[in-house]
Amino acid sequence: MTRICTRDGIELAYESMGPEDAPPVILIMGLGAQMHVWPTSLCQRIVDAGFRVIRFDNRDTGASTSLDEHGNPSLIRVWLGRRLNRKPRVPYTLKDMSRDVVALMDELGLPSAHLVGASMGGMIAQILAAKKRKRVRSLTSIMSSASAPKVPVNQLQVMLKLARRPVQRNRDEHFRYITRMSEVIGSPGYPMSEAEIQRLAETSWERTSSPLGFKRQLVAITHAGDRRRLLQKIKARTLVIHGADDPLIPVTMGIETASLISKAKLRVITGMGHDFPEALVPRLSRLLIKHLNRANSEWQQKLKKKKRAEIPSKKAANEDSGDPMDWLEPLDKPDQSG
């Protein structure tokens, strides 16, 4: 694990897998989740397919900077402010978090990369694909949405359970919370084994950050509001993956996301919830690798076309840099025929 520091003073912890000269894939995780929620087996499959994989902890998560100076923001106040068309002050926004991704790319010397975002990470990746087109080779939006999710009663219950995190650092409570969350948002068709849940709980416990970081990220999501117009600006090759049994962000929101992005491909997985169980890795890796290969081929073709277009202009510039009088026609010679 390595760290970089952004211009905003945020330290981001990240891991890089695969050759540094391979096409880069940046994995952006969701609400309150650490980088290791991306299964290492999934990362390795992508690396084996010829890519470089970079996963990192968002601000207020894991080993990255905790912004405890911003305290405990009021989710209700932010939600009411959005409903009343007001913009309440928040610790930071999804746009700020998208700048973190750009800072990470800059630090690693990456002019562009493929972006894969899950849930909140999908929202961040969408913002970058719309606003930083030259830096995004492709977009994959997993279990995400184009707007702040509407909250029916059953979904509200899920969100309340998510928000009910242990406030103090207590190992037993933390493990119980991870187990409970696996039951609430897990994939019914691909349930996690006890060993997977235990490993996830242990890793997140060892690297845990401020418990209120989750709340500050949730406020950033709520503050973001509607991004549907923004998504219509995305031109990058896009894959939308959503679980048919997602209890947190309904599959209808994944379908809407795909419909808003030009030529986006939608893949709905029956039995998938709002997590990444090992049993899903083979299916997910096949979808991702196929998408990444096609997108990278398109990107390389674009670069070749751009280079070919630059050659004539450089040639013309070189020709123009000669004798400034060369454009004058020579004077006619006097007629000497008699």
Image: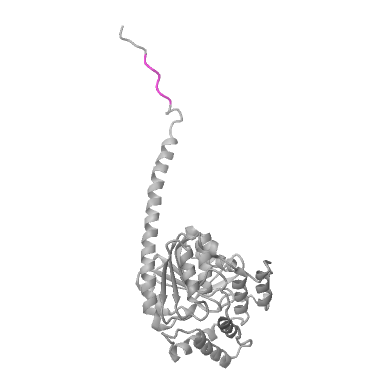
The answer to whether 261 appears left or right of 300 in the picture is right
Q: Provide residue 28's location: percent of width, then percent of height.
A: 50, 72
Residue 292 visible here: yes
Which residue lies most toward the bottom here?
A: 172
Q: Is residue 235 above or below residue 52?
A: above
| Viewer-side residue, 13 vs 45 | 45
Quadrant in which residue 334 is drawn: top left
Q: Is residue 160 above or below residue 236?
A: below
Asked whether 156 falls inside the magenta stretch, the response is no
Q: Name the residue at 60% across, 75% down.
A: 217
Q: Provide residue 241's location: percent of width, then percent of height.
A: 44, 73
Q: Name the residue at 57% across, 72% down.
A: 148
Q: Provide residue 286's location: percent of width, then percent of height.
A: 36, 74
Query: What span is colored magenta in the figure?
Result: 328-333
Q: Provide residue 22's location: percent of width, then percent of height.
A: 39, 66
The answer to whether 275 appears left or right of 19 in the picture is right
